[in-house]
Amino acid sequence: MKHRFALVALTAALSSALGWASTPEDHCPISYSRISIPYDHRGGISTPVVELTFTNETAKKIVRAKFGLIVTGPQGDRVPYEGSLTFSEGADPGKLTSSKWNLDMTKIDIHRLGETIYLQSVRFEDNTTWQDDGNQRCKQEEYYGPK
């Protein structure tokens, strides 16, 4: 039993020292600063627009990122937005980056109570990737309905 404990402790120490304990998949490669969905009223047509500001928290340049969006409706129902929000302008390490996407007016309730944006995948300049495991663990939620 004593030897088993020593072996487990040694394995944990080696894993930590060699960097095996923490992989890029263990954390979110970006941090969110702001998300909002205002309406653009240019040309007499109101178009909902997702405005997102985030920081690349990795040491590598992001060349492509795919985000998902969930809108909280007036009854508190959470409705996934059909269609992805793809970012391909490039995000340098440690830099604040902004992007915006026009949304389909028929898919966004003007009386919504909030929105959640989540990172689905990232491709870096060296062609490595980060992929969400389906749990939307890299997200930012905005709720402005009743508490």
Image (tube, rainbow, N blue to C red):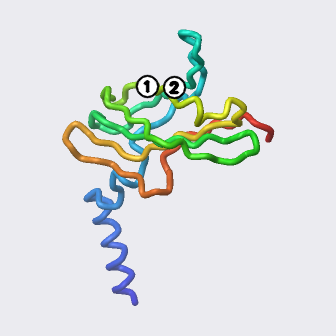
Neighbour tally class for label 1: few under 14, some 14-19, many 20 plus, Cα within 10 Å: some
Q: Quadrant of the C terminus?
A: top right
Q: Which of 77 and 117 is in front in this view?
A: 77
Outermost residue to the top: 43
Residue occupying image coordinates x 66% and y 42%: 72
Position of residue 44 measured from the top left corner of the image (x, y, whole percent):
59, 11
Q: Which amino acid does label 1 sit on?
A: Ser
Q: Gap in Å between the C-alphas at discs 2 and 1?
A: 6 Å
Does residue 108 appear left or right of residue 20 in this picture?
A: right
Q: For numbered disc 2, what is the local secondary structure?
A: strand
Outermost residue on the left side: it is 126
Tally of numbered tags = 2
On screen, residue 115 versus residue 83, left or right, reads right
Q: Name the residue under label 2.
A: 51
Mark 2 closeness class: few <14, some 14–19, many ≥20 residues within 10 Å = some
5 and 139: which one is in front?
Answer: 139
Where, quadrant-wise, is the N terminus in this rendering?
Answer: bottom left
Look at the numbered disc 1 and give the secondary structure of its residue.
strand
Identified at 36% across, 56% down, the residue is 22
Where's residue 56, x and y in %?
A: 38, 34
Q: Check the image and report above or below for 102 versus 57.
A: above
Residue 108 rendering spot, x and y as whole percentages: 61, 34
Provide the residue designation for mark 1.
99
Q: Hey, what amino acid is under mark 2?
A: Glu
Residue 62 drawn at (x, y percent): 30, 35
Q: Earlier in the sequence, mark 2 or mark 1?
A: 2
The residue located at (30%, 64%) in the rendering is 15
The reply to whether discs 2 and 1 touch (Cβ–Cβ < 8 Å) is yes
